[in-house]
């Protein structure tokens, strides 16, 4: 029996809203942010730095609602709320 993170993530089911519950507040902060920390701390790879457009993309559909980005962005630049009722993740136990 395997218990890798990718195996655990596979047991999560999503119901996606068509509106993001994760908002980047200020694009300018991301331009100044040297390490682009969000590209590394999110376990679901929600954030990615688009070098061409010079902005942080947000694949909110993949969010597992761990809350890390609420506290880990060095610029406090991510507006984080839970998805609206009925949307988001459900965990499958057992
Ligand atoms: S860590 Fe915060 S400021 Fe830095 S790129 Fe990500 S959202 Fe922008
Ligand atoms: S709450 Fe967790 S999974 Fe969702 S975007 Fe933030 S760090 Fe990623």
Image (tube, rainbow, N blue to C red):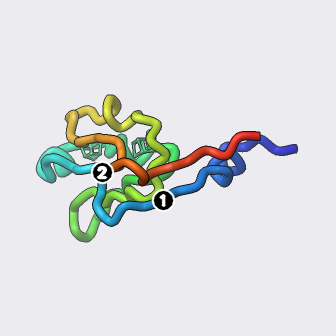
Distance Cα–Cα, label 2 vs label 1: 13 Å
Q: Nearer the viewer, residue 35 or 69?
A: 69
- Image side of residue 63 versus residue 69, left or right: right
2 vs 1, front mark: 1
Q: Position of residue 12 (x, y in %)?
A: 61, 50
Q: Secondary structure at mark 1?
A: strand
Q: Residue furthest front?
A: 86
When the figure is inspected, residue 75 is found, relative to residue 8, above or below; the finding is above
Q: Position of residue 40 (x, y in %)?
A: 44, 44
Q: Quadrant of residue 69?
A: top left
**Mark seen at residue 21:** 2
- Image side of residue 73 versus residue 7, left or right: left
**Mark seen at residue 15:** 1
Residue drawn at the location 28% of the way across and 56% of the way down? 56
**Mark seen at residue 84:** none
Q: Secondary structure at mark 2?
A: loop
Q: Residue furthest bottom?
A: 52
């Amino acid at each position: 029996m395997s218990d890798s993170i990718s195996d655990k993530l596979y047991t999560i089911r999503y119901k996606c809203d068509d509106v993001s519950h994760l908002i980047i507040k200020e694009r300018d902060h991301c331009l100044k942010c040297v390490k682009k920390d969000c590209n590394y701390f999110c376990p679901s790879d929600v954030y990615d730095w688009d070098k061409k457009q010079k902005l942080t993309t947000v694949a909110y559909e993949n969010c597992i609602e761990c809350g890390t980005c609420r506290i880990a962005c060095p610029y406090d630049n991510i507006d984080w709320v839970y998805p609206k009722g009925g949307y988001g993740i459900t965990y499958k136990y057992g």
